[in-house]
Amino acid sequence: MGKIKKSRKRNTFNYNKNKKKLKKKLRRKEKPHIECPQIRKAWDEHKTVKQNLQDMGLAPGTKGMLPIKPKKNTKVEPMETNVLKPYVIEEMEAEASVRGNDRTTCSTDMIEYVQHMVKEHNEDYKAMARDEKNYYQDTPKQIKRKVELYKRCHPEQYAAFIASLQSQKST
């Protein structure tokens, strides 16, 4: 009997695989990328995850964070925290306290729609719902939400629009 065909095949170098890329991919799996820049900056490669997080004053998980209520006779000792890098928490709190910009905007069609409705009916949302330009058959509450969205997204433009309406009515 002869040998199986597969066992006779000699190992050859595969030129189609990028060995450098594969090695980088493996290294990335071993050490995941830390998203938080404050933690990444304070991270020490020579320490374990638990040691690094303890130095920063962070907890690796929720387990053990809240003490279990002890029985009546035992005394509770406060947990010792040795925070060697308090600036990490301070920077994270500062970043969290900064309010982000509101990026919502209104389409030009919706702006025209809202301006028409306000021009014709002022604040009467029921009349707006019965308007013939209400193509999408919005309910009064939906129209009210659209008007409020327009007010919130473009406050200067809305104020100028209302001022122009006031000047037209007074004339």
Image (cartoon, rainbow, N blue to C red):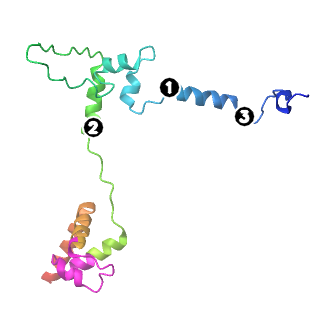
- Which-is-in-front pick, marks 3 and 2? 3
Residue nearer the viewer, 141 or 149: 141
**Circle 1 residue:** 31
Of the residues shown, which amino acid type is indicated by label 2? Answer: Ala
Magenta-drawn stretch contains 34: no
| 93 sits left or right of 16 in the view | left
Depicted 166 relative to depicted 65: above or below: below
Q: Residues within 10 Å of mark 3 (few under 14, many from 20)?
A: few
**Circle 3 residue:** 17
Residue at image location 38% in from the left, 21% down from the top: 42
**Could you tell me which quadrant the C terminus lies in?**
bottom left
Magenta residue span: 115-141
Quarter of the view holding residue 23: top right
Q: CA distance from mark 3 to mark 2?
A: 44 Å
**Circle 2 residue:** 96
Q: Secondary structure at mark 1?
A: loop
Q: Position of residue 96 (x, y in %)?
A: 27, 37
Q: CA distance from mark 1 to mark 2?
A: 26 Å
Q: Earlier in the sequence, mark 3 or mark 2?
A: 3
Residue lying furthest front: 1
- Which-is-in-front pick, marks 1 and 2? 1
Depicted 106 relative to depicted 6: above or below: below
Of the residues shown, which amino acid type is indicated by label 1? Answer: Lys
Q: Earlier in the sequence, mark 1 or mark 3?
A: 3
Q: Secondary structure at mark 3?
A: loop
Q: CA distance from mark 1 to mark 3?
A: 23 Å
